[in-house]
Image (tube, rainbow, N blue to C red):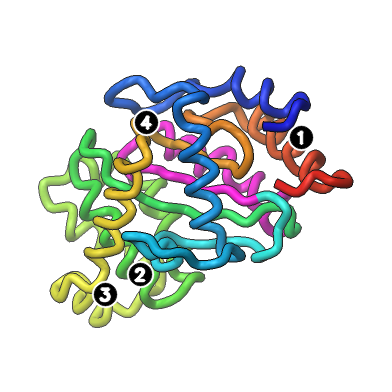
Amino acid sequence: MRAHVVPAVVAALVGTAACADVPARGAEGTEGATRELLAAASVAAEPEPQTLDLSQLGMNRGVENAPVRIVEFSDYGCGYCRKFHEETWPVVLRDFVDTGKVEWKFLPFVSGMFGNTTAASTAAECVLEQGDTLFHSMNSLIWRHQGEWKRSADPASVFRGLATQSGAELPRYDSCLSEGRRTERVEGATSLARDIGVRGSPTFFVVGYPPIQGALPTDAFVQILTLVYNEATMPGGTP
């Protein structure tokens, strides 16, 4: 861990507003897992033998050689995750991901705390099968209509409607669901989250630093990413 201000800032903000079933482990207990996960999950990393092929899980955004790499675990049923994606993510995408500063991997997982979230993750995965652009649209729609599908007695119909709005081809979407083609990816992300001790959502693993748990205020999240980026790009600051 570098002896700079960034770890202190991150540590001070860990454990803020999050959907959690049990208290998250402290930074000392998860730092090793953070480093291991990001080293494996980074698109630019050398492949190593592992139970799960992380390159086949989730959704990557940004350039592969970005100086900062982040893995996000979010449950589609979590209100704090929705808050992050509706308020903070657009700023992060614009100012850090699209500018080449950050490579981001989004992993939707099922915490078991909310109804219909397996169906939500599977619906998102079946749209992702048709392309990244359609997934981005579906992902936004799932967050935006969270209250509707969480309360629905027929969530499949709600998600099919959202898939239509996203522009996905419905015959292919229906086939994906009926054949269970993306089930393994949903189960893999959920298993990985459990294996590394994720106990709340959203949780963000930033290479070289303690994990960040919770939907931080946008300004605070931007401050953290700015500090991490500045430290990563200073001489000798490779994460």
Q: Looking at this rendering, what residue extends furthest in the front direction?
A: 49
Q: Which image quadrant is residue 5 in? A: top right
Residue occupying image coordinates x 75% and y 57%: 99
Q: Position of residue 203 (x, y in %)?
A: 46, 36
The secondary element bearing badge 1 is classed as helix
Element on which disc 2 rests = helix
N-term-proximal mark, 3 vs 4: 3
- Amino acid type indicated by mark 4: Gly
The quarter of the picture where residue 227 lies is: top right
Q: CA distance from mark 3 to mark 4?
A: 30 Å
Q: Amino acid at mark 2?
A: Val
- Sooner in the amino-acid sequence: mark 4 or mark 2: 2
Residue under pointer 4: 200
Answer left or right for 70 relative to 119.
Answer: right
- The one nearer the camera, 210 or 150, is 210
Give the residue pinned by disc 1: 227
Question: Contact, CB < 8 Å: mark 2 with mark 3?
Answer: yes
Measured as percent of width and height from the top left, residue 126 is found at: 30, 69
Label 1, label 4: how far apart the Cα atoms are: 24 Å
- Residue 120 x/y as whole percent: 27, 53
Label 3, label 1: how far apart the Cα atoms are:
41 Å
Taking the image as shown, residue 105 lies to the left or right of residue 95, namely: left
**158 in relation to 228, above or below:** below
Mark 4: give few (<14), some (14-19) or many (20+) Cα within 10 Å: many
Which of the pair 30/233 is nearer the observer?
Answer: 30
Q: Earlier in the sequence, mark 2 or mark 3?
A: 2
Question: Helix or strand or loop: what does disc 4 sit on?
Answer: strand
Which of label 3 and label 4 is nearer to you? 4
Which residue is outermost to the right?
235
| Residue 173 badge | 3
